[in-house]
Structure formats: structure tokens, C-alpha cells
């Protein structure tokens, strides 16, 4: 069976999306509700910084209730992936309780554990990943590592044995950086496109917006489209998340990917098409 592909953006609440992605709205305007008219998944960023209140997850479900096929990929709390101090069962319970509305609704598509560039493949770090996997074994876990030292058979085999997804990433090329992979190690295939703004990516003084200020060309997206099509024969579901968010560029590329993989035209936010006329090539007629 060919896997379904769900395409989204990493986050949806950015000040620079106002007037570019979102039309001018009043106090009652719901950004996620609007975005769900054009995509069928989203990657939640806020869960990386702190466990959300369950009522917030419930609000996300209400905002996407009209699209019952809409799925959420949540980033795991950074307490598990970036903190030097060990975490325990209390933190695991806290995060699980926070995302319980998504889990119980059946609309949790993936839990993304994002490790930093400095997290290399050592015996200690491999044990840390195993400890994490044990704690969240019943969830659709996907692990993102960015250092090429993890690109070894023993790690990939371990992921396959545990049914854990490998996060294939596109990032600015650099020595010791994981390249353009297409590993499917579990029922969830996962792809994140970070952009290729190499100058800002490795500049400590650069801000978030600078690092993710990049628009992929159709030519640059083409190899990823082929990889995703190949993964559809191996996985139960494939998630593709565009993280090059500045000025709505993630949504531009997400819609281009969606059109290419579906083989047809897609709905496009009018404001976005005004800023990126290239979208006229894939937009359904108004």
C-alpha cells in the first residue's frame, strides 16, 4: 500500500506572516484554523520550549475540527534533548499529560525529538537516545540528529529494530553535516527542510529569522520529491515539514511540494500569492 503524505510547516505563529500569509483579521481571527484550509499537518514548535497546557492542545483540535484528517507533529520538550541535567519520570508524565488531548483524539502524527548539532554519536549519547526511546516507546517517535557521526549502520539498524523514525533533513552543507538522506526506519517517514542559508546558519550573531530566510527553487525541491515518493512504498505515513519560515517561504515550498506529490493544483492563500507570484503556476482557479 502506498503511504499517505502529509505536508506542513514548522510552526504557524510568526509576526512576519501577518499580511503575507494571513489576511488582516480581527481579535477573533484564528491563524491555525486558516492555515488548515491549505495544509493537512503542522509541526508544533511551542512544545519544544515548554509542555503546553492541555487546554491549548484542545484549542488546536477545535481550530482544525473541520479537517478531521489534519495531523499534528509535536516537537519534544527540550528538557529531554538539550539539558545537561538528567530528566526523570516526573518530566515524562508532565509532557505526556500536556499532549494527552492530541493523543486521545488520534490526531497525533509524530513526536519529534530534535537534538542539537553538538550531539555527536558517542556511547554516552547513544545511551541517552535509548533512554529517551524507552520513555516514549508507545508514541510515534522520530529522532532528528544533525551530525554525520550518526550516519552509521548500527544506529540505523537500532532505529529499525525499535520502529523509530529517522528525520531526513535538508540543511546548509558543511563538514560533518548529515547530507540528503532517505532513511525509512519505522512506520513514520519524516522530512524537515531547514533552508540553505549557510552564511547565517553558522553565524552566532544571526537571529532566527536570518537563519531560516531561504526559498527553495523547484529544481532544489525535485530530489526531495523523488525521495518522498520512494518512501511512500516503505512507510505507513510520511510527514514533510518546511522550516524555512521567514516571510511565509515555508508555506510557499510546502504548497509546491503538495502540488507536485498530488499531481494537481492546490488552494493558495491570496495574500501569499501576491507576494510570491510563482504560486500562480500551481494554484487552483479562484
Image (spheres, helix red, strand yellow):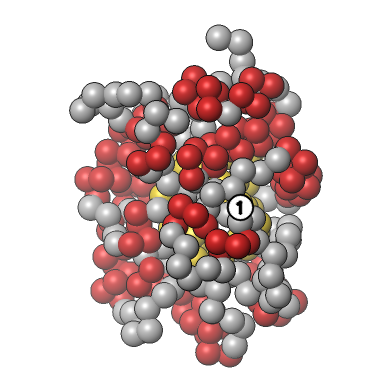
Residue drawn at (29%, 60%), measured in percent from left and top? Answer: 51
Residue at the extreme bottom: 123
The residue under the point 53% across, 89% down is: 124
Residue closer to the observer: 249 or 283 = 249
Q: Is residue 227 above or below residue 144?
A: above
Q: Is residue 17 left or right of residue 159?
A: left
Work out which quarter of the rendered image holds the C terminus and state it.
top right
Query: How many circles with numbers are drawn on the protein?
Result: 1
Within 10 Å of disc 1 (Cα), the crowding (few <14, some 14-19, many 20+) is many
Q: Is residue 173 visible?
A: yes
Report which residue position mark 1 lands on: 195
Q: In the shown orientation, is residue 239 left or right of residue 112?
A: right
Please tell me whether mark 1 sits on a helix, a strand or a loop.
Answer: loop
Percent coordinates x, y for residue 131 in the rendering: 47, 79
Q: Is residue 77 above or below residue 32?
A: below
Q: Which residue sits furthest top?
A: 286
Residue 83 screen position, x and y as percent: 37, 78
Could you say which quadrant of the image residue 154 lies in?
bottom right
Q: What is the x, y in percent for residue 155?
A: 67, 77
Residue 24 percent location from the top left of the image: 33, 24
Q: Is residue 239 in view from this perspective?
A: no
Q: Nearer the viewer, residue 234 or 212?
A: 212
> Does residue 59 appear left or right of residue 182 in this picture?
left
Report the residue at 49% width, 38% height from top. 248
Horizontally, residue 150 falls left or right of residue 9, namely: right
Towards the viewer: 165 or 42: 42
Camera-side residue: 276 or 225?
276
Point 58% across, 28% down: residue = 276
Q: Quadrant of residue 27?
A: top left
Quadrant position of the N terminus in the picture: top right
Amino acid at each position: 500500500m502506498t503511504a499517505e503524505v502529509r505536508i506542513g510547516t514548522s510552526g504557524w505563529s510568526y509576526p512576519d506572516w501577518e499580511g503575507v500569509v494571513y489576511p488582516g483579521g480581527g481579535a477573533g481571527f484564528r491563524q491555525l484554523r486558516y492555515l488548515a484550509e491549505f495544509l493537512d499537518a503542522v509541526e508544533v514548535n511551542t512544545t519544544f520550549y515548554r509542555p503546553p497546557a492541555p487546554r491549548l492542545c484542545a484549542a488546536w483540535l477545535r481550530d482544525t475540527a473541520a479537517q478531521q484528517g489534519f495531523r499534528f507533529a509535536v516537537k519534544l520538550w527540550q528538557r529531554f534533548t538539550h539539558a545537561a541535567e538528567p530528566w526523570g519520570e516526573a518530566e515524562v508524565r508532565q509532557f505526556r499529560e500536556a499532549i494527552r488531548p492530541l493523543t486521545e483524539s488520534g490526531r497525533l502524527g509524530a513526536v519529534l525529538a530534535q537534538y542539537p548539532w553538538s550531539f555527536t554519536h558517542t556511547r554516552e549519547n547513544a545511551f541517552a537516545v535509548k533512554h529517551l526511546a524507552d520513555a516514549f516507546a508507545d508514541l510515534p517517535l522520530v529522532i532528528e540528529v544533525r551530525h554525520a557521526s550518526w550516519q552509521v549502520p548500527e544506529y540505523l539498524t537500532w532505529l529499525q529494530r525499535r520502529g523509530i523514525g529517522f528525520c531526513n533533513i535538508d540543511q546548509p552543507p558543511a563538514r560533518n553535516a548529515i547530507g540528503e538522506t532517505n532513511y525509512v526506519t519505522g512506520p513514520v517517514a519524516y522530512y524537515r527542510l531547514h533552508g540553505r542559508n549557510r552564511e547565517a546558519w553558522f553565524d552566532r550573531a544571526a537571529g532566527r529569522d536570518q537563519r531560516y530566510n531561504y526559498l527553495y527553487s523547484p529544481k532544489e525541491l525535485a530530489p526531495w520529491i523523488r525521495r518522498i515518493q520512494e518512501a511512500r512504498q516503505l512507510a505507513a505515513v510520511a510527514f514533510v515539514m518546511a522550516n524555512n519560515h521567514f516571510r511565509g517561504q515555508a508555506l510557499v515550498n510546502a504548497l509546491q511540494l503538495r502540488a507536485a506529490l498530488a499531481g494537481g493544483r492546490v488552494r493558495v492563500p491570496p495574500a501569499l500569492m501576491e507576494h510570491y507570484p510563482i504560486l500562480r503556476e500551481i494554484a487552483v482557479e479562484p
